[in-house]
Amino acid sequence: MRIDVISIFPDYLAPLELSLTGKAMAAGLLDVGIHDLRDWTTDRHRTVDDTPYGGGAGMVMKPEPWAQTLSHVAGLADPAERAGLTGGTDLAERAGLTEGTDLAEGTDLARSSDGTQATTASATDAAAEAGEKPVLIVPSPAGAPFTQADARRLAVRSHLVFACGRYEGIDQRVIDWAGGDFDVELVSIGDYVLNGGEVAALVIIEAVARLIPGFMGNPESLVEESYEDGLLEYPVYTKPADWRGHPVPDVLLSGNHAAIARWRRDQRLIRTQRTRPDLLAGLPDEALDTRDRQALTEAAREVEPGGPGG
Ligand code: SAM
């Protein structure tokens, strides 16, 4: 999968070099390009923002640098038009994971630009061959809530592009214009407001990348995770069996696999009922059997006043 991230703070994306995403880049599962929006401005001050039409507080991100950068990452820009403009850094190259240009050492920007363009174009070609546009993800508190189902849906796409806004956000016309060449999605990572889209991009990239086949050392660890089937995960324990007077539930030491599976299922149901009743309410009827409903009824009774847990 090819991922391009556009930001005025490209260093914000450095954590992608760490841990499993870094390994996935080294293994060629992930190909990440980080682009500084200011590299695509043409004025002396490298301006990316201006005052809002209609008045009001704050600044709005200007459309043209976005159009230039997006055209570049989608392989749409005419290289001649790009003369004199830089074109982003391959993160694996920055991390020294592959051979290439190291921007930190101040090496040839044009060479870096060409290299990035070639990689981007091939990812875009692959997307085009699959009959797909690249996906343009615009993190925004006004976007649709990001869920595990979205992560699964995006994990099978070949090219994701993240447009990380700052200030009051990006001029709406960029989002409208990009619809011609990208599948555009406005995505929120929660009901709160961040300073910029970079942290949101990191969240979405991590959630998506770990679902790419080959990313996780043990794919089994994905199977029973929270949200995979609309339930939260059961509580987990490791050694010692008794820690500071807190024992591990007996059933987990019993060696009885059927009893352990039942206990875990019950814990998932009870936890979801208590923490995220909205998830439980959204499950289709057939998702719960009689034994599941019984576990939920018993758990609800336990927390009622006068009940065993009340
Ligand atoms: N004026 C915008 C509003 O009220 O909807 C908030 C802009 S916010 C200060 C700047 C940028 O942070 C946004 O353009 C977006 O990229 C990012 N951002 C902030 N909160 C976010 C969230 N909950 N999910 C995704 N991105 C967010």
Image (cartoon, rainbow, N blue to C red):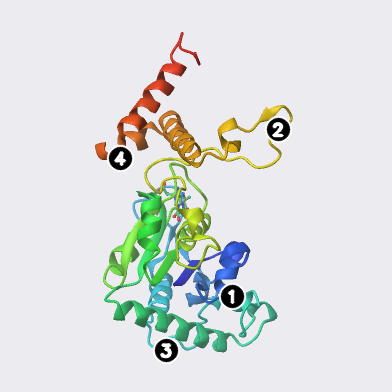
Dot label at residue 242: 2
**Foreground residue among 89 and 222:** 222
User: Considering only order in the chain, which callout, 4 or 1, is on the residue closer to the N terminus?
Assistant: 1
Closer to the chain start, of discs 2 and 3, is 3
- Please tell me whether mark 1 sits on a helix, a strand or a loop: helix
Which callout, 1 or 2, points at the residue further toward the start of the chain? 1
Number of labels in the image equals 4
Measured from the top left, where is residue 118 in percent x and y? 46, 86
- Please name the amino acid that badge 4 sits on: Ala
Q: Nearer the viewer, residue 39 or 178?
A: 178
In the rendering, at what x and y percent does residue 279 appear? Answer: 36, 37
Q: Read off the residue under disc 1.
A: 26
Which circle's residue, 3 or 4, is located before the other in the chain? 3
Nearest to N terminus: mark 4 or mark 2: 2
Local packing at callout 2 (Cα closer than 10 Å; few below 14, some 14-19, many 20+) is: few
Residue linked to disc 4: 287
Helix, strand or loop for disc 4: helix
Mark 3 = which residue? 79
Task: Pick the quarter of the image with the N terminus.
Answer: bottom left
100 over 307 or under it: above or below: below
Amino acid carrying mark 2 in the image: Asp
Alpha-carbon distance for marks 1 and 4? 40 Å
Q: Which is closer to the viewer, label 3 or label 1? A: 1
Residue at x 28% of width, y 64% of height: 176
Residue 275: % across, % down: 45, 32
